[in-house]
Amino acid sequence: MIFDVLTLFPSIIHAYTGESILKRAIEKGIITVNVYNIRDYTEDKHRQADDYPYGGGSGMILKVEPIYNALCHIDKDGRKRYKILLSPGGRLFTQKVAEEFSERYDHLLLICGRYEGVDERVKHFIDEEISIGDFVLTGGELPGLVIIDAVTRLLPGVLGDENSPREESFTTGLLEYPQYTRPVEFKGMRVPEVLLSGNHKLIKRWRRKEALRRTLKNRPDLLKTIELSEEDRELLKEIKEEEQWI
Ligand code: 9D3
């Protein structure tokens, strides 16, 4: 998978892709991240990438020409790319969208805006706008990295096969169960006895119950979208008897 990133702050992208799992994925040749500085494609002697909004108002707007120039330069190799503008008004990025991108495309281009937005005419040169959630950031770099990160970990060979991305929280539809590692006791807090029991059937039941408990508490909306088994209903009944907040 190739990611092209257009940004005014290339070092933000390099800082994250130069560490840990993404760094390894790059070294293994599973992904390539090409970073382009939008300022390099400005046309004036001050290399101005932003300007005041027509009609007035506060804040600066990213100009259309530098982005268009960068896209023309990058497109000269003739490769097909799916072009995404990171934008607070875009389609919501979810695990489903990450799966869709990882399966459907082998080349994504991400445009990171800054300031108070980008000139509307940029939208003529892209395939879609993506938002990562209902909160306001100062730019599209973190959202761009979120997409690179979430898509990359789905690609074959990135994660070890012990932690396959297929059977996790957002794929099972529940939040994850609590996990513990050594020591068995820390400041008086003990690892639940069942996890030390070696009884795999009991452990499985406990994990399912705690996943249900966590989901009921933090994301009750998720419980309405998944299919509950007979055992799930039993466990939820136990949870509701145990918890006084419900
Ligand atoms: C005046 C309206 N503002 C939109 C809420 C303007 C504005 C503020 C901040 C436009 C862009 C930005 C910078 N944010 C992004 O570029 C961005 C973003 C975000 O802020 N939240 C969630 N997803 C994304 S994707 C890109």
Image: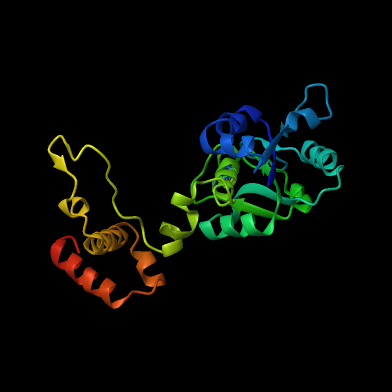
Q: Is residue 10 above or below residue 136?
A: above
Q: Residue furthest front?
A: 198
Count the numbered circles shown: 0
Q: Is residue 77 above or below residue 99?
A: above
Q: Nearer the viewer, residue 120 or 240?
A: 240
Q: Give how far across and how far down residue 164 sits, in percent.
A: 48, 53
Decide if residue 93 is on the left or right side of residue 62: left
Looking at the picture, the colour scheme in use is: rainbow
Residue depicted at x 60% and y 40%: 25
Q: Could you tell me residue 240's position as x and y percent? A: 18, 67
Which quadrant does the C terminus fall into? bottom left
Residue at image x 28%, y 78%?
A: 230
Determine the image quadrant of residue 41.
top right
Tell me the residue at 60%/38% (across/down).
141
Res 24 quadrant in image:
top right
Q: Tell which of 42 and 58 is nearer to you.
A: 42
Outermost residue toward the left? 188
- Give the percent coordinates (x, y) of residue 26: 63, 37
Which residue ends up furthest to the top in the rendered image?
Answer: 45
Taking depth in this image into account, of 162 and 139 the one nearest to the observer is 162
* 67 displayed left or right of 159: right
Observer able to see residue 209: yes
The answer to whether any part of residue 9 appears in the image is no
Residue 92 is drawn in which quadrant? bottom right
Ligand 1 quadrant? Answer: top right
Q: Position of residue 127 (x, y in %)?
A: 73, 55
Left or right: where does residue 187 sit relative to residue 140?
Answer: left
Residue appearing at x 31%, y 55% in the figure: 177
